Image (cartoon, rainbow, N blue to C red):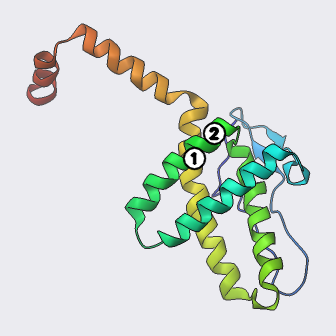
Amino acid sequence: SSYDVRSSKVRFPSVEGQSFDRSSDKQTSSHGEAEELPDTHESKSTDAEAIGAHFWEMLTILVDLIWEPESMAEKLVATTKYFFELGVRQAHLETIGYAICTTMQKSLGEDWKPPMKHAWEWFWDMISTSMVETLNVFELGDVKVIRSGWEEAKTLKNPQELGDIFFLE
């Protein structure tokens, strides 16, 4: 199944009160059918706590890199690979974003005003969009396909032949 962060955005905590609006508790499967997202925000397992701690560490680093897009992108790819290995999938990102926003709202209290809310929505959208792209590569097995295709090309053609195809054809 595929999760599109752009079509199902996390809605950050309301500025006026304590109401929260998760715009969608469904995702669309690869067959176009709506599926219920797992309700992972109530999990209290040590695995979830460890993943949460890693997300806070990642956010700290990304905030420091906010005006260094190349470094941020590199860090996000490496970190997302690590999260994939821990079991994080695209379907989890909405819940994670919701938890981050709720935590920020509760931590900042009265300082959680519209400009702060908007800024964090932008920041999470940027992060989660990159993570979706990277998670999709891992979930589909594209890395294995690329590596096996490259190895096959190298067994079928020597470097000179590959170079000739690339530059001459």
Residues at marks 2 and 1, CA–CA distance in whole angstroms: 6 Å
Vertical relation: 113 (above or below) 46: below
Which circle marks residue 95 in the picture? none
Is label 1 in a helix, a strand or a loop? helix
Residue at 61% x, 57% y: name it: 128
Q: Position of residue 15 (x, y in %)?
A: 81, 85
Vertical relation: 18 (above or below) 132: below
Name the one closer to the observer, 130 or 29.
130
Tag 2: amino acid: Phe
Find residue 140 and report its image quarter: top right
Find residue 147 and report its image quarter: top left
Q: How many marks?
A: 2
Residue at 43% x, 73% y: name it: 67
> Going by the image, does 145 lie left or right of 139?
left
Residue at 79% x, 79% y: name it: 107
Vertical relation: 92 (above or below) 29: below
Q: Position of residue 135 (x, y in %)?
A: 59, 41
> Going by the image, does 164 lie left or right of 8?
left
Instruction: Evaluate whether residue 7 shows in this view.
Output: no
Residue at 33% x, 12% y: name it: 152
* Residue indicated by mark 2: 84
Instruction: Evaluate whether residue 152 shows in this view.
Output: yes
> Going by the image, does 25 lie left or right of 2?
right
Is label 2 in a helix, a strand or a loop? helix
Q: Residues within 10 Å of mark 2 (few under 14, many from 20)?
A: some
Tag 1: amino acid: Thr
Q: Residues within 10 Å of mark 1 (few under 14, many from 20)?
A: many
Q: Position of residue 164 (x, y in %)?
A: 10, 22
Q: Are marks 2 and 1 in contact (CB under 8 Å)?
A: yes
* Residue indicated by mark 1: 80
Vertical relation: 68 (above or below) 168: below
- The quarter of the rendered structure image containing the N terminus is top right
